Amino acid sequence: MYICILANTGFVRTEEIANYLASLLLEKPIEISKKATIESYKLEEYTGTYKLEGKKAKTMEIIILADQLILT
């Protein structure tokens, strides 16, 4: 499983965000080994509603607030 953190300018560590998303999908934490950054002018490409598939199907919405991508 690959989890890509699109942007993280807040105080939460990237690993914690990835583990949270993994725990929603797999019901157990995982570790990530690679990080990537994205240019701020490309943030709008990633906004929208996404369906997370797993044991319990959920949806995740990504919005832009100031200069940050926010997962809801």
Image: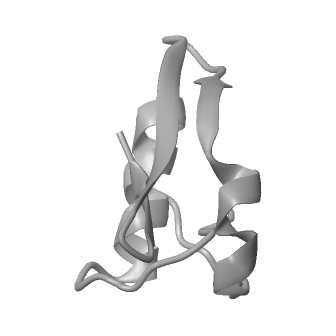
Q: Position of residue 13 (x, y in %)?
A: 34, 83
Count the marks: how many? 0
Q: Position of residue 27 (x, y in %)?
A: 42, 34
Of 58 and 55, the residue lying toward us: 58
User: Is residue 37 depicted above or below 47 in this figure?
Assistant: below
User: Is residue 56 depicted above or below 59 in this figure?
Assistant: above
Residue 43 visible in the snapshot:
yes
User: Is residue 20 depicted above or below 13 in this figure?
Assistant: above
Residue 28 visible in the snapshot:
no
- Give the residue drawn at x 75%, y 72%: 42
Of 35 and 11, the residue lying toward us: 11
Colour option used: one colour
The C terminus: image quadrant: top left
Q: Position of residue 51 (x, y in %)?
A: 64, 21
Instruction: Place residue 34 in its image quadrant.
Output: bottom right
From the viewer's perspective, tell me whether residue 14 is left or right of residue 2. left
Instruction: Place residue 3 in its image quadrant.
Output: bottom right
- Give the residue drawn at x 49%, y 31%: 60
Of 45 and 1, the residue lying toward us: 45
Residue reaching furthest left? 11
- Give the residue drawn at x 64%, y 83%: 40
Of 11 and 65, the residue lying toward us: 65
From the viewer's perspective, tell me whether residue 12 is left or right of residue 24. left
- Give the residue drawn at x 71%, y 79%: 41
